[in-house]
């Protein structure tokens, strides 16, 4: 469009296994979606409805690039997560139809300034600056569902410097992918390009400069970044 008064923003994009790029529109994140992680954060997994927060699209970090240690924190945490890439939009999507809206899946990290999040929780303030900061969403290649199917179970694991820090199974998600899409699409109309980070299992912990994070999800792929 010729009437823009400044250059329009460039779309963030995630490489797709086998070629091409997935343009990113919004990033929705599910909070507390594995019972053991809910407990380690002080919650009760039996009584809580799903809740969501967001990251800006340009928080994505791709290609195994290094992640700069962010400003204003002394407690940067890793959260290893299954990422769902929405290929077809919709609102009030039925659970039975939900997987038809998925383009593919990736392994990702919901990096978190845990100290700022704890302060925000205590003060009843938003999480944005603890969750949605620059380069807070390292994401691996997206594997098309047409090629790899829809993983409902399988190992999800994160190693830091070669040592296992998080290990669980996708089957332990409190809200599975169809349920998450159905619930979220009742709150907002989903659109092609949206990503959903589906929550982390237990074992979240701090990282420091120099740490190498290597995550993998069975049947989906991997994510790698070094904190610098
Ligand atoms: Mn998370």
Image (cartoon, rainbow, N blue to C red):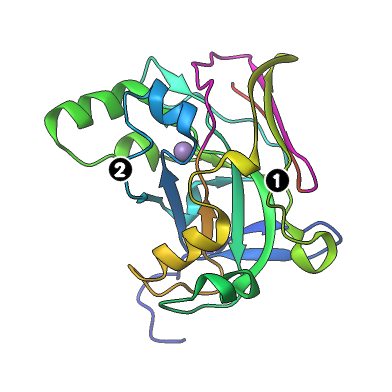
Where does the image place residue 223, in percent across and percent down from the top left?
70, 37
For the C terminus, give its image quadrant. top right
Mark number, residue 128: 2
Please identify the residue farthest to the left as the structure is shown: 123
**Disc 1 secondary structure class:** loop
Magenta part mainly helix, strand or loop? loop
Q: Is residue 142 above or below residue 2?
A: above
Sequence-earlier tag: 2 or 1:
2
Please identify the residue farthest to the bottom as the structure is shown: 2
Q: For this view, does 118 lie left or right of residue 177?
A: left
Q: Is residue 167 above or below residue 81?
A: above
Stretch of the chain drawn in magenta:
200-219
Where does the image place residue 205, in percent across and percent down from the top left?
50, 17
Mark number, residue 153: 1
Q: CA distance from mark 2 to mark 1?
A: 30 Å
Q: Residue at x 74, y 50 (%)?
A: 141
């Amino acid at each position: 469009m010729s009437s823009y008064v400044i250059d329009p923003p460039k779309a963030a994009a995630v490489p797709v296994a086998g070629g091409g790029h997935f343009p990113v529109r919004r990033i929705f994140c599910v909070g507390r979606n594995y019972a053991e992680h809910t407990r380690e954060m002080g919650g009760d997994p039996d009584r809580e409805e799903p809740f969501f927060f967001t990251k800006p699209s340009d928080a994505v970090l791709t290609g195994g690039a290094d992640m700069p240690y962010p400003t204003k924190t002394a407690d940067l945490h890793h959260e290893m997560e299954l990422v769902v890439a929405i290929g077809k939009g919709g609102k009030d999507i039925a659970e039975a139809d939900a997987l038809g809206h998925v383009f593919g899946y990736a392994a990702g990290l919901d990096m978190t300034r845990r100290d700022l999040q704890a302060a925000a929780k205590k003060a009843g303030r938003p999480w944005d600056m603890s969750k949605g900061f620059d380069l807070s969403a390292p994401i691996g290649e997206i594997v098309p569902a047409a090629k790899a199917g829809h993983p409902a179970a399988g190992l999800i694991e994160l190693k830091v410097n070669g040592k296992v820090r998080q290990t669980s199974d996708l089957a332990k998600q409190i809200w599975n992918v169809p349920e998450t899409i159905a619930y979220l699409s009742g709150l907002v109309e989903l659109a092609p390009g949206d990503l959903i980070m589906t929550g982390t299992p237990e074992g979240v912990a701090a990282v420091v400069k120099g740490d190498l994070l290597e995550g993998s999800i069975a049947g989906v792929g991997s994510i790698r970044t070094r904190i610098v």
